[in-house]
Amino acid sequence: MAERPYIVGNWKMNGTRAMLSEARAIDRAAQRYMKAEVAVAPPYTLIHAVHREAEQIGVGAQDCHAGAEGPHTGDIAASMLADAGAKFVILGHSERRGDHGESNELINAKIDSALEAGLRIILCCGESLDIRDAGKAEDFVLDQLRASLPHIKDPIERLTIAYEPIWAIGTGRTATIEDIKAMHAAIRKLLDETYGEEASSKVRILYGGSVKPENAGEILSTPEVGGALVGGASLSAESFLGIVVAAS
Ligand code: PEP
């Protein structure tokens, strides 16, 4: 497994230029806690500014269009994100799937486009509470991944998976350590089967869903948890850095 935990803040639709001070504080602290790889995905409007200010942290985006350019009002191409300084893009987040009806096939096409533009990918997957209660969480998540994972092997180190049970996002409720362990092991098995064990070992599997400084240590020491995708707690440098410290 890749050794350095990857701690990524997803600012979602939050943040104006006033938030740049948080990014600066995160960047300064990340220079002291080098055991973790730290990144943030601000809204599009702040990518370039965060990129210019940040010396240590990675900057990414929260989505991109599947096409390279063209008549898609309001959309953004992966190459534009790269041009603005983004190094990665989060794709398949449950809020994109829910709010915009994104399918696994569309997400797969976006992944191809982002890889083509040289970006790293954080591919999100996760089940709803109904699916978990019906005992189908593992099948559902593995089906999502089978239908959206990139087919090519070469840029495998540019792929990260984030398991985010929908019922744990922004709810304050986290999955149990046993649930996380079982799902991450199932995802690893699928990656081993898809890419071979050596290539699969380069792919980190993050956990996301109400990660905060108080629970980060336990979650991050769970087998096969290679880091965290953090929503709410990434909006203040203080709470986000609490998670970075727990990972260090
Ligand atoms: C997310 O939406 O990626 C997320 C993990 O959110 P939160 O940490 O707020 O649950």
Image (cartoon, helix red, strand yellow):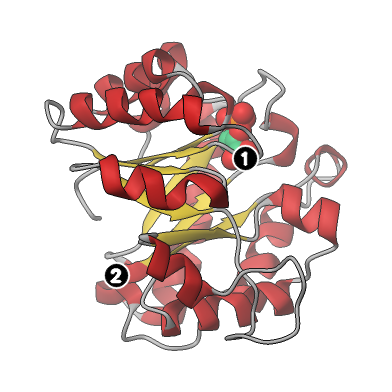
| Residue 74 as seen in the image, left or right of residue 187 | right
Distance of label 2 from label 1 (alpha carbons): 25 Å
Q: State the image quarter where residue 231 is shown.
A: top right
Residue at (34, 79) in percent of width and height: 196
Q: Provide the residue designation for mark 2.
A: 157
Q: Where 213 sits versus 73, above or below?
A: above
- Label 1 beta carbon less than 8 Å to ligand 1: yes
Dot 1 falls on a residue whose secondary structure is loop
Q: Nearer the viewer, residue 78 or 132?
A: 78
Q: Nearer the viewer, residue 195 or 120?
A: 120
Residue 54 place in picture, x, y as percent:
25, 41
Q: What is the quadrant of the C terminus in the image? A: top left
Amino acid type at mark 1: Lys
Residue 188 place in picture, x, y as percent:
43, 60
Report if residue 217 is visible in the image: no
* Tag 2 near tag 1, CB within 8 Å: no
Q: Where 213 sits versus 42, above or below?
A: above
- Between circles 2 and 1, the one closer to the viewer is 1
| Residue 66 as seen in the image, left or right of residue 129 | left
Q: Nearer the viewer, residue 203 or 58?
A: 58
Q: Where 125 sits versus 111, above or below?
A: above
Q: Nearer the viewer, residue 123 or 77?
A: 77
Residue 135 place in picture, x, y as percent:
79, 46
Residue at (57, 86) in percent of width and height: 68
Report if residue 101 is visible in the image: yes
Q: Where 98 sits versus 215, above or below?
A: below
Query: Mark 1 Cα within 10 Å, few/some/many (few <14, many 20+)?
Result: some
Residue 76 place in picture, x, y as percent:
62, 69
Q: Provide the residue designation for mark 1.
A: 12
Badge 2 or badge 1: first in the primary sequence: 1
